[in-house]
Image (cartoon, rainbow, N blue to C red):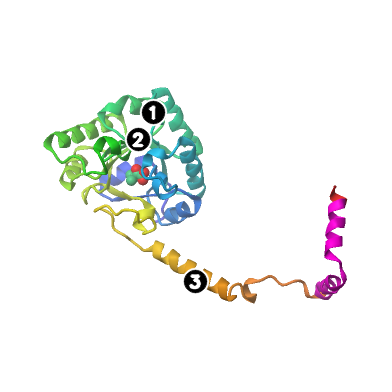
Amino acid sequence: MAFSKVTTKKLIEKKQKGLKIVTLTSYDYAFAKIVDDSKIDLILVGDSLSMVMLGHKTTLAVTMDEMIHHTKAVARGVTNALIVGDMPFLSYKVDIKDAVYNAGRFIQAGAEAVKIEGGTEILPIVNAMIGADIQVMGHIGLTPQAVYKFGGNLVQGKTTEAAKKLLIDAKNLEKAGVFSIVLESIPWQLAKLITKSVSVPTIGIGAGPHCDGQILVIHDMLGIYTDFKPKFLKYFGNIGAEIRKALASYKDEVEKGVYPDMEHSYDFPKEDLDKVNEWFESADLDAEAARAKAKKE
Ligand code: KIV
């Protein structure tokens, strides 16, 4: 079956049909093209790029301008997947007008929706964005922009009160009109209840098998970013090791003069080769260079 342009409506239909939704992050043109070719439903230009692309310790450091720069690159590589821009820290909770404006910048950069972190407390922001015709993805549970409030990257929703709050948050986000909700690092039983109670798809990361879909950070699942490994993370490849192997081989061949060989070198046209060699043997290169420079001045 031909894989065609994914829309938020199609994702909701997938949930209704009981079909799993497969999503990943991407941050640049080359990766986005491979992910899109692999028929992944949704590509999130995640603020995780702060860590995996820019080397910061948390997601808090990445700026709007950096997110927009990467969103534009991803958009150039994608034909079918739904592109979601992840709104960074300070871009939507300070002021509602700024939130809508910043969400609009993602859309102008090529995203088709934005993701924001938070529950019931951010409903006015969600309403304003949806009021401006911008599609919104929610994100509850372990919301990494609140890492210092949580005291670390800790599993959320582990008490009755916390579980009730997350169920209510999900319901409120659904009622406000989000097209999907990311559930991050919560017990699978709670994710199952949330998934059952909302009509929009839940996309889990560290939220067990009962979510409507899954998301992983692409640099994590490929074994490229290995600074830490949460319990939920499974390596689906070891591209980091493959890259190291390739680089060692490149270094070795260059050092030994094996690369580049003639197969990877350009030939000078045969008919002129003698003329160039002749000129080279007789010319005073320093004088020729000085003459060319003086002519330019
Ligand atoms: O920034 C990100 O990559 C995310 C996903 C982990 C959901 O928010």
Name the N-terminal-most of marks 3 and 2: 2
Tell me the SS state at disc 1: helix
Image position of 257 with respect to 97: above or below: below
Where residue 249 is drawn, which disc sits there?
3
Three-letter code, disc 3: Ser
Which quadrant of the render holds ligand 1?
top left
Where residue 129 is drawn, which disc sits there?
1
Range of residues picked out in magenta: 272-294
Tell me residue 266's x, y (percent). 69, 70
Image position of 146 with respect to 218: above or below: above
Where residue 116 is drawn, which disc sits there?
2
Q: CA distance from mark 3 to mark 2?
A: 43 Å
Q: Residues within 10 Å of mark 1 (few under 14, many from 20)?
A: many
Q: Residue at x 83, y 53 (%)?
A: 293
Tell me the SS state at disc 2: loop
Say if the magenta span includes residue 249.
Answer: no
Res 233 → quadrant: bottom left
Q: CA distance from mark 1 to mark 3?
A: 50 Å
Three-letter code, disc 2: Ile
Tell me residue 297's x, y (percent). 85, 47
